[in-house]
Image (cartoon, helix red, strand yellow):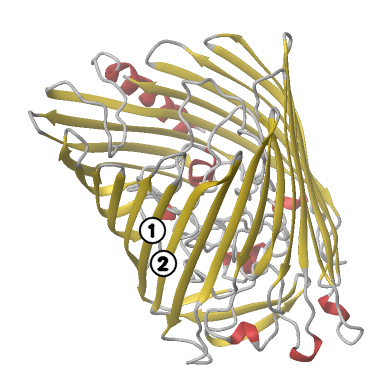
Amino acid sequence: MKHALKVGVLIVGITLTLSSYCWAQTATPSPSPTPAAKGFALHANGSTVFVGQQTGGPGTQPAEGPGFAAGSPLSPNTPYDLWSSAAMTPGYAGIFQTEVSGQYTGTRLYGGATLGLGIVDGSVTNAAYWGENLLPTLNPHLGSTALPYRIVFPTHAGEDDASAWRLSLLGANIGANDGSWSLRGGYFDLQQSLSFVFVQPPLTNVTPSIGLAPAESLGDGPPALSAWPSPEPGLPLSGLDGTARSGNTSFEVTDASLPALPQTAVHLHMASAAMQGANHSSLSLQVLDLDTNGALISTTTLYGYDAHTIASPQGDLPISTLGNQHEMIAGLSGSFLAAPGLTAVVDAARSWYDAADVIRPGTQAPGGYYHTALTHALGTATLQLEGYRFEPRYATAILPYGTPENVWSAAWAWPGVWLKSTYQLVNNSVMGANRQGYRVRLLSNDSGALSYRFSFMQDRQIEPATFDTMTQTGFVDGFFLPEANDAATIGGQTQLAGWLAWRARFGTLTLDYVNDMLERPALPSSPQDYDDYVSPQVVLDYSKQVSPATILSVGIGRYAMRGVWEATPVDYGETTAFAGAQLQQSAHFALLVNARHATFDGVPSGPLDPSPFFASNIVVVEERYSI
């Protein structure tokens, strides 16, 4: 804690020093930028974050912990936050980050570069999970070794402490003032992308906020001041990116590396074009080519080399090793006015996958993605009907990064972002691999005192997840474990979601609800394949903007996991109480303070396992500046 307090003092000093300069927040170049004044400009923005966490209870030392840290696919239930699966460990961390950009604007062209300075001191786990997304040159999830990050289950503060700092060139850019073209190099976010062709890897941190929301919420996220920056779209890409615009058509070409495990590499080539037409019509095309190389990787699939399963209370968990993967994806999206008052969207894509180290060479096959949506206004609300087909061989490149506790590592947590510590190239938040189904949504226009959003979604497996299908190259099922070939059944999911917001003079009350219900029948000969599992999540939040510069929030949430999974009883839950505030101190500085108290309860996984009871207190203080 002493180290974290020291870095906090250092951070405040640096922040006050920066405030003596006249800088403004920089923004990512756009294909249609706002004309800038000619000459040289210097900009800076960043944050100072302090994280303090205390934990206690037998769940801090889960029975699955040692094996999980050694690479076992058997996931612990605690100590992880069920809302995000972020690791919850005792400790204190101080983080200072700033990006300083210099740009010269001439008669026709502009050009500039961005430097990043990051300082981290204290608990590495808390810094990596509960502060702002770390700068790329400090971020262990992007492959940086500056911080000695590893899977640990400490019981006292100070057991995973470390210090590091980096001053780095993060990127450079050049382009035309009229937005006709631009070129960026270094770390960057995409300007445009079809989410069913490519999305940036998901963030590994819980972005500081003053509220709480389920991962699949229909709402707008936790309460926030309008001036508070939105979370980043995902982990950045590293490489070169070019954009161009001609009339109403924009283009983007990308050559970049993606996050990967040590001694492995993932390289991406991609191009896209988007055209805007009359009456809100549009047409977009995107093509992706990806290669992986380097050391073989251990994955929770069955089509890699040395494929086998590991028997556990969580089912027969697949495991194999893969290397030298190749994936191509081509997608097309169009929107148009199908009839008066009826808007239609049609998406279609095809992918081709293969890998060098597989158990059944020659069994690969193309996969497809198909989505249609019809939207119609109903008075003050909008009704939307969608149909999805996400085939089991579509976009199934295996892309692990960081360590296994990066993404959704808590056992049985939902949504099960595909294959635990890997990320999928495309958006699978509505419907994942090997699923087809539909979704109906009713959304208010949010202009009155009462706003509402409701959703009903139902999907089924396209093909059964058997030992035959799951050993075919590129075949992935989003959640269910393999069955015997002669005991195949079809499982599915139903999701209910609702969001209500009542805006009154005394403040805003928000009710956020999501319930994922998964079910797969089993034949009498294979009772171990039976799944009947629900994951209800509800958050009640009260917030009030007491002035244009101050907003307060307080609430409580409950995340439960109940039912039977692979014939194993599941009975766990987390209750989280939270309170926070944001204060716009001036045109250049804003403060966030948030506190959470979480308790985890339930029954042990096995008769000899320790109780999963676990409690955590977290305080996050963040000072943001744009000067």
| Residue 613 visible here | no
The residue under label 2 is which amino acid type?
A: Ala
Left or right, residue 471 beside residue 145: right
Residue tagged by mark 1?
285
Q: Are marks 1 and 2 in contact (CB under 8 Å)?
A: yes
Q: CA distance from mark 1 to mark 2?
A: 8 Å
| Residue 466 visible here | yes
Left or right, residue 420 beside residue 10: right
Placement of the C terminus among the 4 image quadrants = top left
> Camera-side residue: 558 or 405?
558
Q: Position of residue 243 (x, y in %)?
A: 25, 48
Q: Position of residue 323 (x, y in %)?
A: 42, 80
Q: Position of residue 178 (x, y in %)?
A: 18, 34
Q: Position of residue 333 (x, y in %)?
A: 46, 56
Residue tagged by mark 2?
330
The mark nearer the N terminus, 1 or 2, is: 1
> Camera-side residue: 621 or 559?
559
Could you say whether the residue bearing mark 2 is in a helix, strand or loop? strand
As drawn, the residue found furthest toward the left would be 107
Q: Mark 2 packing: few (<14 Cα in 10 Å), some, or many (20+)?
A: many
Image position of 561 with respect to 48: above or below: below
Image position of 119 with respect to 583: above or below: below
